[in-house]
Amino acid sequence: MASVLNISAYLFTHIADPASLRPVLKERTEARGLRGTILLAEEGINLFLAGPAEDVRGFVDELREDERFAALMTKESWSDEQPFRKMLVKHKREIIRMDRPAIRPEAGRAPAVDPTTLRRWLDAGVDDDGREVVLLDTRNAFEVDHGTFSGALDWRIEKFTEFPEAASAHRDELVGKTVVSFCTGGIRCEKAALVLREDGIDARQLEGGILGYFEHVGAAGFEGDCFVFDERRTVDASLQPTG
């Protein structure tokens, strides 16, 4: 039985002191023998951790005692081996780089669609109001190549900073439709949905991203595997490593 718990989580929340918080979290994770990456910025936190279940969950519970992180939700999966080589805690300008300072999810999220609702829409071919549903993959092209939703739009972007320009270029194709942006765990599609809405597109994000969809719905409508940024490389709909 797989013994290493892997978690991914992010939260857009204002952090006034990310630089001073960095050594605190570094010490806490190392004390528990965890490995992975934590990114801190004024806009929030993004983390990928792995280790014994008791230690991973204990760290998250301790982190949630800080009111800034009380709403942090994690996605869990298991592996036979530790997928990270070291423990890194970094202070960044953004927890997911877009280079659009005006896009601030911590100040207000775009509407979200839960996985069960999205599956119902995909089965019906329309949303609950009878409008055409368009799935938009906001990930980089090499990630999409490992697997994506059947029929999803893929703009072949090489890095996330290209997304706003691509959205403007494709705006006319999306106006009047219900657009659901998605990504691996939710963080990129959260910013992407805000960009789309600024362009007058009725966009919402897939709650929890592909990993959340796998957890609650399974593989329905998805072809291939999901790329993840650790030594597992890809996971299937049961969240088991395939890379």
Image: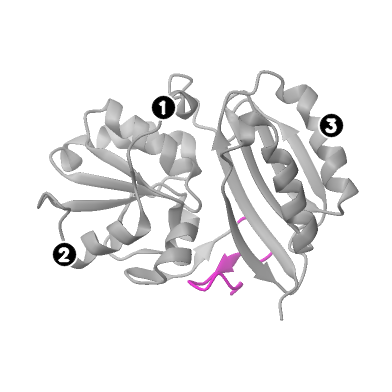
First of labels 3, 2 by sequence position:
3
Q: Residue at x 76, y 51 (%)?
A: 58
For the question of whether residue 150 can be seen, the reply is yes
Q: Secondary structure at mark 1?
A: loop
Whole-percent x and y of residue 167? 31, 36
Quarter of the image with the C terminus is bottom right
Disc 1 residue type? Gly
Q: CA distance from mark 1 to mark 3?
A: 29 Å
Mark 3 sits on what residue? 23
Q: Secondary structure at mark 3?
A: helix
Disc 2 residue type? Ala
Q: Within 10 angstroms of label 3, few (less than 14), some, or many (20 or more) residues?
A: few
Residue 3 in the image: above or below residue 120: below
Residue range in magenta is: 229-243
Q: Is residue 43 left or right of residue 189?
A: right
Instruction: In the rendered structure, find residue 108 and report the number of the disc placed on it.
Output: 1
Whole-percent x and y of residue 101? 48, 20
Q: Within 10 angstroms of label 2, few (less than 14), some, or many (20 or more) residues?
A: few
Q: Residue at x 64, y 30 (%)?
A: 67
First of labels 1, 3 by sequence position:
3
Report the front residue among 174 and 6. Answer: 6
Mark 2 sits on what residue? 124
Q: CA distance from mark 3 to mark 2?
A: 50 Å
